[in-house]
């Protein structure tokens, strides 16, 4: 028999016969000598069922296997349950039975049968539900084996696990609890039938329960301390609450967000930033009703300025608009469109007086007029000819200041060339190259010669 068991019926009112629940949690090293023990199954066939609830009044993230050491033989039927809302609701974590199909209508499985895709599956295992023997006292809930699906058999690739925990809320919640409950449904019988003549041999006894984890602080704390008999996160990053689950007062400039494991290895703090009301004036002169805090600059700016305004406080005009000097800053018509002529201006922007920047040869407030020597032709273009300075020669006529219409015998920008010169065919028989008889040019030459003759003699 088990040397640790009571020789007589356990009695909670008698110190020598009492085995209270706290004996499941006293530190005893490798070989426990104290244990909790339930009443015996003296009311058989009424089920002998016991619930053991572990509460921390704090959200805990499990980091290692849950280990339960029995001194009475591992139970024939047991359910490990978890709560995420401080015991208000419960959900199964794992089923244990000598016959899963008979006890829970589930096919037996072990964690080794799972994978990355099925790691969240709730299973029933028969691995731990055998009668009492010296080497079969322990029941596990395998946390590390589930970690290994992501971090490798020896948990060397923790970056992969952290990445999955960071991006998969269901996986993160699977390893998170506020309470655990051990539901003992049927004690270790060891035989096919219950020996009704010796019902005192059937009971539950647990010497040790180990739950390893850390306070859930949403990666906003590195220390968890006892405060008024409760575990409390020492919150950082301007967060507060039992799990650092909200931003502190005056630090609600953006929605709260948990810290992130990514990028590995340093992660991201996701610090709560100061509220707009606590750091400055969200004055947008009626052109916006929304502001944003810029962490890098520690300043507030207006968002989505309307009425063609821009700037930190919507106090400037958008490009392509200029300030209406006769309007107040909060006037919807405070900014007037520049209306720069797209053909005459370099861009669509103007200065504070509404004057646009004009292209060469163009003038006017809106760049829609031409300077002297230029004419409008899809914008101001330099004149080729005019009736003042740039005359067409040899009888040519100026057409719209952009080209000379030359007689048939002449060519060139100003009709200054003989067409035959370009062809290399000018001659005495060509009818070109010499002025016609009696032409003004010949009369002018005769006059000049007659005037010069007295100077020779």
Image (tube, rainbow, N blue to C red):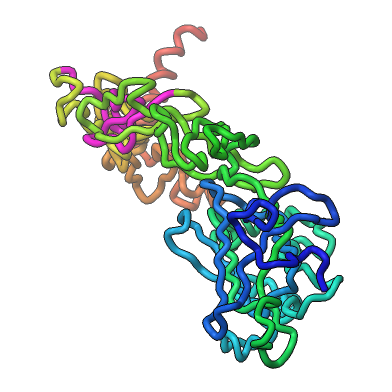
User: Which residue appears at 85% of the width and 56% of the height?
Assistant: 31
Q: x and y percent of residue 408 in the render?
A: 37, 51
User: Which residue appears at 22% of the width and 25% of the height?
Assistant: 285
Q: x and y percent of residue 282 in the render?
A: 30, 25
As drawn, 105 above or below 371:
below
Which image quarter is the N terminus in? bottom right
Instruction: Judge whether residue 339 can be spotted in this image.
Output: no
As drawn, 6 above or below 42:
above
In this orientation, which residue lies closer to the viewer: 335 or 216? 216
Q: How many labels does the image show?
A: 0
In this orientation, which residue lies closer to the viewer: 266 or 148? 148
Q: x and y percent of residue 162 in the render?
A: 68, 54
Q: Is residue 165 magenta?
A: no
User: Which residue appears at 85% of the width and 55% of the height?
Assistant: 30
As drawn, 118 above or below 311:
below
In this orientation, which residue lies closer to the viewer: 188 or 293? 188
Q: Is residue 303 magenta?
A: yes
- Please state the extent of the stretch shown in magenta in the rendering: 299-325
Q: x and y percent of residue 397 in the render?
A: 28, 40
In this orientation, which residue lies closer to the viewer: 268 or 227? 227
Instruction: Judge whether residue 9 can be spotted in this image.
Output: yes
Q: In which quarter of the image is residue 300?
A: top left
Q: Is residue 325 left or right of residue 406?
A: left
Q: In this view, does 259 lie to the left or right of 202?
A: left
Q: In which quarter of the image is residue 183?
A: bottom right
Q: In which quarter of the image is residue 66?
A: bottom right
């Amino acid at each position: 028999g088990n040397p640790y068991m009571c020789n007589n019926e356990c009695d909670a009112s008698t110190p020598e016969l009492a085995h209270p629940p706290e004996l499941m949690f006293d530190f005893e090293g490798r070989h426990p000598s104290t244990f909790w023990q339930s009443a015996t199954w003296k009311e058989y066939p009424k089920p002998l069922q016991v619930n053991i609830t572990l509460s921390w009044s704090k959200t805990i993230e499990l980091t290692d296997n849950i280990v339960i050491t029995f001194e009475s033989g591992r139970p024939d039927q047991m359910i490990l349950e978890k709560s995420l809302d401080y015991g208000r609701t419960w959900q199964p974590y794992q089923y244990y039975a000598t016959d899963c199909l008979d006890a829970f209508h589930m096919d037996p499985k072990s964690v080794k049968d799972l994978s990355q895709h099925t790691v969240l599956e709730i299973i029933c295992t028969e691995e731990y539900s055998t009668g009492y023997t010296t080497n079969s006292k322990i029941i596990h809930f395998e946390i590390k084996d589930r970690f290994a699906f992501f971090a490798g058999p020896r948990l060397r690739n923790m970056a992969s696990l952290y990445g999955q925990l960071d991006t998969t809320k269901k996986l993160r919640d699977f390893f998170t609890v506020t309470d655990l409950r051990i539901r003992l449904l049927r004690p270790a019988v060891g035989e096919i039938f219950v020996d009704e003549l010796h019902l005192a041999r059937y009971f539950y006894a647990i010497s040790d329960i180990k739950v390893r984890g850390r306070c859930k602080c949403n990666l906003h704390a590195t220390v968890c301390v006892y405060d008024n008999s409760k575990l409390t996160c020492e919150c950082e990053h301007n967060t507060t609450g039992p799990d650092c689950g909200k931003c502190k007062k005056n630090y609600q400039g953006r929605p709260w967000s948990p810290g992130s494991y990514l990028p590995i290895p340093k992660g991201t703090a996701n610090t709560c930033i100061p509220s707009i009301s606590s750091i400055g004036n969200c004055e947008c002169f009626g052109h916006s009703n929304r502001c944003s805090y810029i962490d890098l600059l520690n300043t507030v700016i207006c968002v989505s300025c309307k009425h063609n305004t821009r700037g930190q406080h919507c106090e400037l005009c958008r490009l392509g608009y200029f300030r209406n000097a006769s309007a107040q800053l909060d006037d919807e018509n405070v900014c007037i469109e520049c209306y720069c002529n797209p053909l005459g201006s370099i861009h669509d922007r103007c200065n504070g007086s509404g004057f646009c920047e004009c292209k060469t040869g163009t003038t006017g407030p809106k760049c829609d007029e031409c300077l002297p020597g230029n004419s409008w032709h899809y914008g101001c273009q330099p004149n080729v000819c005019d009736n003042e300075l740039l005359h067409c020669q040899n009888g040519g006529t100026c057409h719209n200041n952009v080209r000379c219409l030359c007689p048939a015998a002449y060519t060139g920008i100003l009709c200054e060339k003989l067409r035959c010169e370009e062809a290399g065919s000018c001659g005495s028989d060509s009818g070109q190259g010499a002025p016609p008889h009696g032409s003004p040019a010949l009369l002018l030459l005769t006059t000049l010669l007659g005037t010069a003759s007295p100077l020779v003699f």
